[in-house]
Image (tube, grey):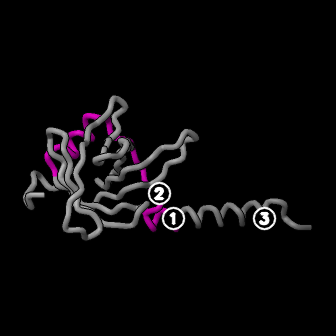
Amino acid sequence: MANPMGHASRTGQLVLGVVAIVAAAGGCREDRVLSGEEARALFAGKTVTGYHEKKGYRFKSYYDPAGTFRSYQGGSSTPKHGKWWINESGDECVEWQGESPLCRKIVTDDKGHYWKIKIKRNGKRILIVSFMRFFEGNPEKL
């Protein structure tokens, strides 16, 4: 007679194996949404490099503490200009000239990585931007 627990045991071992592989590959992380104060401190007066995951380009941007924003995107030698701020919900918002504002959550993990995400009404998180580095000031005069 077959062991009725045999199937469940193999399934449990398979699930644990998959969890271990994902964790080893960095697929499991504890992330948290930054508060508005944390997001402002992270961006204000900083030059930031990153990768726009949705549109597929690298960028370098300067977040002036007064709320202006300049960004070189995808290797362009001409910057895009706009405004940035942190809204009442703690979202980082960017408004390019002539466009509607885009406001997104900033999240971090316990290793100091930062991302910009959109949280849909159903709670699903969509990765928008991966931030690479934050530099004090505007050393490259962006």
How packed mark 2 is, by other alpha carbons closer than 10 Å (few <14, some 14-19, many 20 or more), is few
**Res 87 quadrant in image:** top left
Label annotation for residue 22: 1
Q: Tell me whether circle 1 and circle 2 mark residues in contact (CB < 8 Å).
A: yes
Which element is circle 2 on? loop
Q: Magenta includes 119?
A: no
Residue 42: x and y in percent read 22, 45
In space, the residues marked 3 and 2 are separated at their CA atoms by: 28 Å
In this view, the mark in front (3 or 2): 2
Q: Looking at the image, is mark 1 or mark 3 earlier in the sequence?
A: 3
Residue type, numbered disc 2 = Cys
Q: Looking at the image, is mark 3 or mark 2 earlier in the sequence?
A: 3
- Residue 45, placed above or below residue 80: above
**Quarter of the figure with the N terminus:** bottom right
What residue is rendered at 48% in x and 52% in y? 126
Q: Nearer the viewer, residue 95 or 33?
A: 95
Horizontal side, residue 8 vs residue 95: left or right = right
Q: Residue furthest bottom?
A: 75
Label annotation for residue 12: none
Q: Nearer the viewer, residue 42 or 44?
A: 44
How packed mark 1 is, by other alpha carbons closer than 10 Å (few <14, some 14-19, many 20 or more), is few
Label annotation for residue 28: 2
Q: Which residue is mark 3?
A: 6
What residue is rendered at 24% in x and 47% in y? 82
What residue is rendered at 49% in x and 48% in y? 125
Q: Magenta includes 21?
A: yes
Which element is circle 1 on? helix
Q: Looking at the image, is mark 1 or mark 2 earlier in the sequence?
A: 1
